[in-house]
Amino acid sequence: VKEITSCNNIEDMNATLKYIFNKICEYIQQNKKSNNELLKKEIISFINENYKNNALSLTLIADSLRMNPSYLSYFFKEQTGENFIDYLNKVRIEKAKELLKNSCISISEIASQVGYSNAGYFNRIFKKIVGITPGQYRSSLDHVMSVEVKCYN
């Protein structure tokens, strides 16, 4: 208000109003980015805490966050650069790799523990992401590890 009342002519007032408008727009944009980052972190946290649930879905997350599933899908892709199911599969496969490396439980049990109800589907997704099957991955670890651990499925 002080800036506007101190204007001497219409050109000064126009320039002042443009300046104030730009500052408001910058503030809104910054606030939006901050809120987007918080929501993205909340979604990723939800996935990391619930990846074991084989019923985990975009709809489940959207419902828990009181969001529209279509908007959540759009938002997630916009914020992370990848779609929800690809991200979820990556999280699950990383957890599976840890289990393959640090335990001797069966591959079908690992599939179940990381959220896949179908071991065949788990094997296909694992190979798609890692380039080899879970069994091949586990075997390759035997050659790398200094203490050889044999796991039998």
Image (cartoon, grey):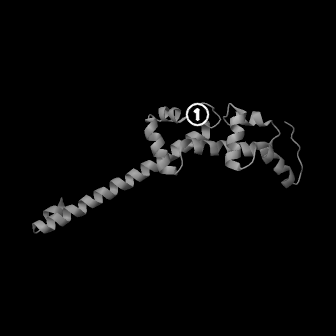
Residue located at (42% from left, 48% from top): 35
Q: Is residue 2 left or right of residue 82?
A: left
- Residue 70 seen in this snapshot: yes
Q: Nearer the viewer, residue 59 or 136?
A: 136
Q: Quadrant where the C terminus lies?
A: top right
Q: In this view, does 72 lie to the left or right of 1?
A: right
Residue located at (15% from left, 64% from top): 13
Place of residue 38 in the rendered image (x, y in percent of width and height, measured from the top left): 47, 47
Query: On the image, which quarter does residue 30 sit in?
Result: bottom left
Q: Quadrant where the N terminus lies?
A: bottom left
Q: Which amino acid does label 1 sit on?
A: Leu
Place of residue 110 in the rendered image (x, y in percent of width and height, measured from the top left): 74, 37
Residue picked out by circle 1: 56
- Residue 94 seen in this snapshot: no
Vertical arrangement, residue 142 with respect to residue 153, above or below: below
Residue located at (49% from left, 47% from top): 77
Q: Is mark 1 on a helix, strand or loop?
A: loop
Residue located at (80% from left, 35% from top): 106
Query: On the image, which quarter does residue 66 sit in?
Result: top left
